[in-house]
Amino acid sequence: MSEVFSTQPEKETLNSMSAVYKLQMSDEIFDKLSQFIYSEYGIKMPKAKKVMLQSRLQRRLRDMKMNSYEQYCDFVFSKEGEAMELVHMIDVVTTNKTDFFREPTHFDFIRHTVLPEFIARNRQKTTMKFWSAGCSSGEEVYTLAMVVSEFMDNNRNMDYSILGTDISSRILQKAYDAVYTEERVINIPLELKRKYFLRSKDRVKPTVRLIPEIRKKAIYQRLNFMDDSYPVQEKFDVIFCRNVLIYFDRETQQKVINRLCNHLKTGGYFFLGHSESITGMNVPLVQLKPTVFMKV
């Protein structure tokens, strides 16, 4: 006896998705959301990004079974929405583009200059502290971990820890899990992949994961660069803040760099992305190489 399965739920789901995709965000709603995103998170949202914002919020409307962007906006700015939805909104708004060994000259500088200097200055075993500010899904954190771990093979007189911060809770969970598709690690040297990654048994969707010894070196926490002060207690030897400031205006960039530098040791190193500059800023940094600075 054959069974007949109803397709009605599937049709309803498809119809719901189609209805959301047809919704349009008004200029008034875009202005309200973009001004809030800028004032609270420092992210510039010019008119040209209206289609992008509309597209990225479609899933939130669908998941919450809302019929308009006006309804969504009203909820976001309600007391309940501020408590429950803001974190999800910023998760979909933020861009999280990163790669392992991105801007490799920085890691060469760490390997050949920063780490040997640290060993020379510290005769007793000391922990070197790194901060990946805007760490996204963890590729920068784990690249640093591999570079330092390789150096430690011949220099046991040190240890290290890495703090990774980001505004997106969703992306921080990915960083904590440390699971990546094989395509994401394709550019990592084979010997490092064999040494630091575990392969999944899934041959349909193969993934890799950082070994526990590397994962335990990283601590993650959510942080908003627009806060007046950062809930970080320690002082760091190295801060990476790469390809994050490009989303802020010049005044905000200067404020963020100064707040970060409050947590950088004098003589510590500060790294920016290659599309970023501190020219003309009042910050306690001197340039050593393109996008590489030292706190004075």
Image (tube, rainbow, N blue to C red):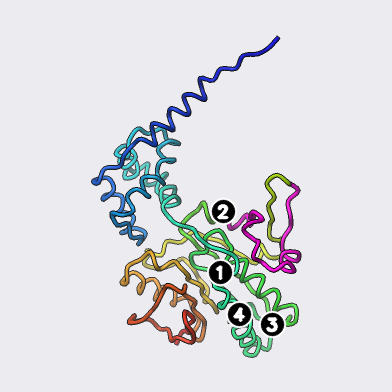
111 to 59, vertically: above or below: below
Residue type beneath disc 2: Gln
Question: Which residue is pictured at 56% across the width and 69% down the height?
Answer: 102
Residue indicated by mark 4: 108
- SS of the residue at dot 3? loop
The Cα–Cα distance between marks 1 and 2, rounded to whole angstroms, is 21 Å
> Label 3: few (<14), some or many (≥20) within 10 Å?
few
Residue indicated by mark 2: 173
In the visual, does 234 lie left or right of 277? right
Dot 1 and dot 4 residues touching (CB under 8 Å): no
Q: Residue 89 location in percent, x, y?
A: 41, 48
Residue 102: give its label.
1
Q: Residue 130 location in percent, x, y?
A: 57, 73
Q: Quadrant of the C terminus?
A: bottom left
- SS of the residue at dot 4? helix
**Comparing labels 1 and 2, the label whose residue is closer to the camera:** 1
**Comparing labels 4 and 2, the label whose residue is closer to the camera:** 4
Residue type beneath disc 3: Lys
Question: Which residue is pictured at 53% across the width and 69% down the height?
Answer: 132
> Label 2: few (<14), some or many (≥20) within 10 Å?
some
Residue indicated by mark 3: 125
Q: Residue 274 location in percent, x, y?
A: 46, 74
In the visual, does 170 lie left or right of 40? right
**Comparing labels 3 and 4, the label whose residue is closer to the camera:** 4
Marks 1 and 2, the one that precedes in the sequence: 1
Range of residues picked out in magenta: 175-202
- SS of the residue at dot 1? loop
Residue type beneath disc 4: Asp
